[in-house]
Image (cartoon, grey):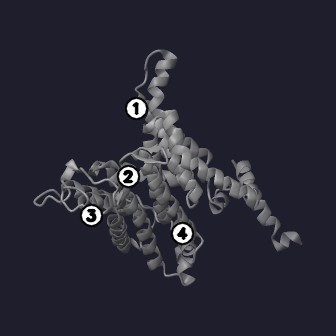
């Protein structure tokens, strides 16, 4: 892995090769739904859509956990806030049917407000204590969504909200089949391109935040909050900004999820979802955007690929000895354990994480060799 990373850095140093690689990646991403649909079926194109949604979710949590170092186990609550705002205002439940271009910013704003409401009382909490409080917050939101159907039916309780309006701009609906220049684009294909554009936008925002003064302030707080405050950083505002930014990303993802699915219920926003999103950034590489994207794709695609375990048993042994669902989760859990043992910093860790875990001996040796006293 270190050799591949070194070759990647050498490759990036050549601008012509780098631009050629970006062009090839753009072509691949553009053709990916058609290639996947032809090879594996449209069901896997739908999985690609969910992978892009999880990338957006993981990028938001990466701001809170990866940049600012604030362990949030209730992050899926902001996802639920964005999804329910879209569902309630774009369905027959209240019969409002507001347009998508208005609902998405509203969902981001409301989720950001909830992020501030969560962050304000927890400014003095760190580590395990912060994790417990955020976990409780996520469960409170889920329980509220389940029980807010009496005496006034607001969320329709455990039955959820259905008949949600699909994502549409003007007269263009993303859930319908369209034809452009003789090429047929089914609804799941057009959703893919919408999610891809928004995911790229969030990646761009994350990159700009990472290299900004705010991003460096988040890293300073993550490394040592007392030292950061002594250097003049307003830790209260910076931490609240991290919660608000991360929650806004989740709110946007939740609105897209509601429009894409057409139905939501409280069961879609349980603790397991928060843990999975956290695993994405930890296994991919906390604080590193490329690692977060890799983790989100792997943890979305890999569990779905393991659904074929039953067919594989039948092909090899002639019958199924172990239930496919149980064996699937066993292999999935074992894979997570092995990655944490052999790659504790993640599959694509940031430079700082590699230094902390001793994963980059060549870099450490180079730094030591550059010290003045060693040069002498």
Query: Of callouts 4 and 3, which one flags the residue occurring earlier in the amino acid sequence?
Result: 3
Query: Of callouts 2 and 1, which one flags the residue occurring earlier in the amino acid sequence?
Result: 2
User: Quick check: marks 4 and 2 in contact, CB under 8 Å?
Assistant: no
On screen, residue 286 versus residue 24, left or right, reads left
Position of residue 121 measured from the top left corner of the image (x, y, whole percent): 35, 73
- Give the position of the C terminus as an image quadrant: bottom right
Local SS, label 3: loop
Local SS, label 4: helix
Query: Which disc is residue 222 wearing?
Result: 4
Residue topped by disc 3: 98
User: Quick check: marks 2 and 1 in contact, CB under 8 Å?
Assistant: no
* Residue at the extreme bottom: 232
Give me the C-alpha separation between circle 4 and circle 2. Answer: 40 Å
Query: Of callouts 3 and 2, which one flags the residue occurring earlier in the amino acid sequence?
Result: 3
Crowding at dot 2, Cα within 10 Å, few <14 / some 14-19 / many 20+, comes out as: many
Residue topped by disc 2: 174
């Amino acid at each position: 892995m270190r050799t591949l990373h070194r070759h990647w850095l050498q490759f990036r140093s050549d601008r012509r090769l780098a631009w050629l690689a970006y062009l090839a990646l753009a072509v691949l991403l553009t053709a990916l739904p058609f290639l996947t649909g032809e090879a594996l079926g449209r069901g896997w194109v739908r999985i690609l859509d969910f992978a892009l949604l999880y990338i957006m979710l993981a990028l938001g949590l990466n701001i809170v956990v990866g940049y600012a170092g604030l362990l949030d186990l209730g992050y899926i609550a902001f996802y639920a806030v964005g999804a329910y705002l879209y569902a309630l205002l774009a369905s027959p439940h209240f019969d409002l049917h507001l347009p998508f271009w208005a609902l998405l910013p509203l969902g981001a704003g409301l989720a950001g407000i909830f992020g501030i409401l969560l962050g304000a009382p927890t400014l003095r909490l760190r580590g395990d204590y912060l994790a417990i409080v955020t976990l409780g917050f996520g469960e409170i939101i889920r329980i509220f969504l389940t029980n807010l159907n009496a005496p006034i039916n607001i969320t329709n309780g455990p039955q959820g909200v259905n008949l949600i309006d699909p994502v549409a701009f003007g007269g263009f609906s993303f859930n319908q089949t369209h034809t452009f220049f003789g090429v047929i684009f089914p609804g799941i294909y057009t959703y893919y391109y919408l999610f891809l554009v928004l995911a790229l936008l969030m990646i761009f925002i994350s990159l700009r935040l990472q290299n900004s003064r705010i991003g460096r302030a988040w890293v300073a707080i993550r490394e040592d909050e007392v030292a950061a405050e002594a250097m003049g950083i307003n830790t209260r505002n910076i931490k609240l900004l991290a919660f608000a930014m991360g929650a806004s990303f989740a709110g946007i993802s939740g609105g897209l999820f509601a429009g894409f699915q057409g139905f939501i219920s409280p069961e879609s926003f349980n603790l397991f979802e928060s843990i999975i999103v956290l695993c994405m950034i930890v296994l991919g590489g906390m604080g590193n955007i490329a690692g977060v994207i890799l983790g989100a794709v792997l943890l979305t695609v890999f569990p779905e690929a393991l659904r074929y375990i039953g067919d594989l048993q039948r092909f090899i042994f002639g019958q199924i000895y172990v239930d496919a669902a149980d064996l699937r989760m066993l292999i999935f859990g074992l894979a997570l354990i092995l990655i944490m043992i052999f790659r504790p910093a993640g599959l694509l860790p940031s430079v700082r994480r590699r230094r902390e875990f001793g994963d980059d001996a060549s870099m450490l040796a180079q730094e030591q060799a550059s010290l003045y006293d060693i040069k002498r």
